[in-house]
Image (cartoon, rainbow, N blue to C red):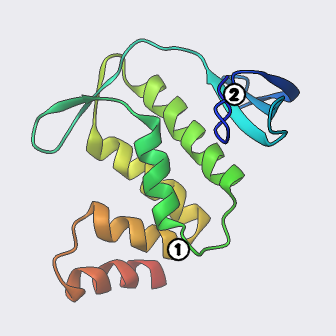
Amino acid sequence: MKCPYCKNMEDKVIDSRAVGEGSSIRRRRECLECGKRFTTYEYVERAPLMVIKRDGTRKSFDREKIKVGIIKACEKRPVSMDRIEQIVEEIEREVHKKAAQEIKSTVIGNMVMEKLYALDEVAYVRFASVYRRFKDVSHFMKELKKLIE
């Protein structure tokens, strides 16, 4: 594994543990050259899953896109990276259970919104404002009223 700091190829594994109900392994590594530590994840390779976008185009499922969206929504909120990673793993598992080869992006977006709603209301509204493409303040206020009720 290449060190993200000095690019050395030699490291040692300090700790390994299963995450996501055993569907992946988290490893803490230490570079033998610079001594810095970093984390890697290993996942089971699954059959390719295509996501059908709103415009009808198809793209490969990418868990990192989900993770980036959640991180942006949770920016400056009291949400740990471990919790974000758990949510991404939960969504990925659900997506693979629901779909054999293809799934609509709206299904994935709704899954993310459900998880964020339970996690942090501010993160939920942030994600919803981008995902649902709020055009003006009235759309935003409708979503806030739903939260208040």
Which residue is drawn at the image coordinates 46% and 63% (left, top)?
72
Q: Which of marks 1 and 2 is nearer the N terminus?
A: 2
Residue reaching furthest to the left: 55
- Label for residue 8? 2
Label 1 and label 2: CA atoms lie apart by: 42 Å
Quadrant in which residue 144 is drawn: bottom left
Which residue is drawn at the image coordinates 71% and 50% (left, top)?
82
Residue type, mark 2 in image: Asn
Q: Where is residue 41 in the image (x, y as percent from the top left)?
A: 66, 29
Q: Position of residue 142 (x, y in %)?
A: 29, 82
- Label for residue 87? none
Q: Where is residue 23 in the image (x, y as percent from the top left)?
A: 66, 23
119 to the left or right of 108: right
Q: Do the residues labelled 1 and 2 touch (CB within 8 Å)?
A: no
24 to the left or right of 48: right
Res 149 seen here? no
Residue type, mark 1 in image: Glu
Q: Position of residue 85 (x, y in %)?
A: 63, 45
Residue 143 vs residue 24, the one in the foreground: 24
